[in-house]
Amino acid sequence: MLFPEAERGERVVVCLRKSRAWGLTRGRTYPGTLFAPYVNAAGYMNKGSQRNAIIRAARSALSLPHDEALMSDVGDPVERFGWSSMDDIRPLKPDGTPMNAEEVQAIKRHHEENSR
């Protein structure tokens, strides 16, 4: 149900992980707004035209402006936060700032407790 709706452009679906398990091929162009972009080891989309198309589709679906001037604020997290490498990347809060170590550990504990 999810993929056919995305192929018709009724919803945006971005498969960042396990695309092969869903029968998708990374980097391939699918109809509508179904995407399986190339990602790095941290799960961030690689820069390029497909990433830009995904951002445009998501912004459009959320009724957010999507002009090119706003694309720069979405940039590479290593550059955006001044991290020295991908090893510094932590999950982001809803406001876009990185979580501290305690917040990450709390989420891991919550997930472990609720997955039993």
Image: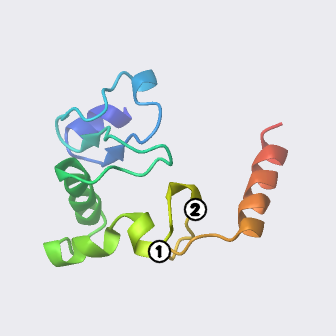
Q: Is residue 59 visible?
A: yes
Q: Residues within 10 Å of mark 1 (few under 14, many from 20)?
A: some
Q: Position of residue 4 (x, y in %)?
A: 28, 32
Q: How is the image coloured?
A: rainbow
- Quadrant of the image for the C terminus? top right
Up-down relation of residue 114 to residue 72 (above or below): above
On screen, residue 109 versus residue 58, left or right, reads right
On screen, residue 74 versus residue 97, left or right, reads left
Q: Position of residue 115 (x, y in %)?
A: 78, 39
Q: Is residue 64 visible?
A: no
- Tag 2: amino acid: Asp
SS under mark 1: helix
Residue at figure coordinates x 50%, y 66% from the top left:
84
Q: Is 73 in front, or is 114? A: 73
Q: Position of residue 16 (x, y in %)?
A: 42, 42
- Confirm or deny contact between disc 1 and disc 2 (CB under 8 A): yes
Mark seen at residue 88: 2
Q: Give whichever of discs 1 and 2 has the lower sequence position.
A: 1
- Tag 1: amino acid: Phe
SS under mark 2: helix
Q: Is 12 in front, or is 89? A: 89
Q: Residues within 10 Å of mark 2 (few under 14, many from 20)?
A: few
Q: Position of residue 85 (x, y in %)?
A: 50, 60
Mark seen at residue 89: none
Q: Is 78 in front, or is 36? A: 78
Residue at figure coordinates x 75%, y 52% from the top left:
108
- Quadrant of the image for the N terminus? top left
Kindly identify which residue carries mark 1.
81
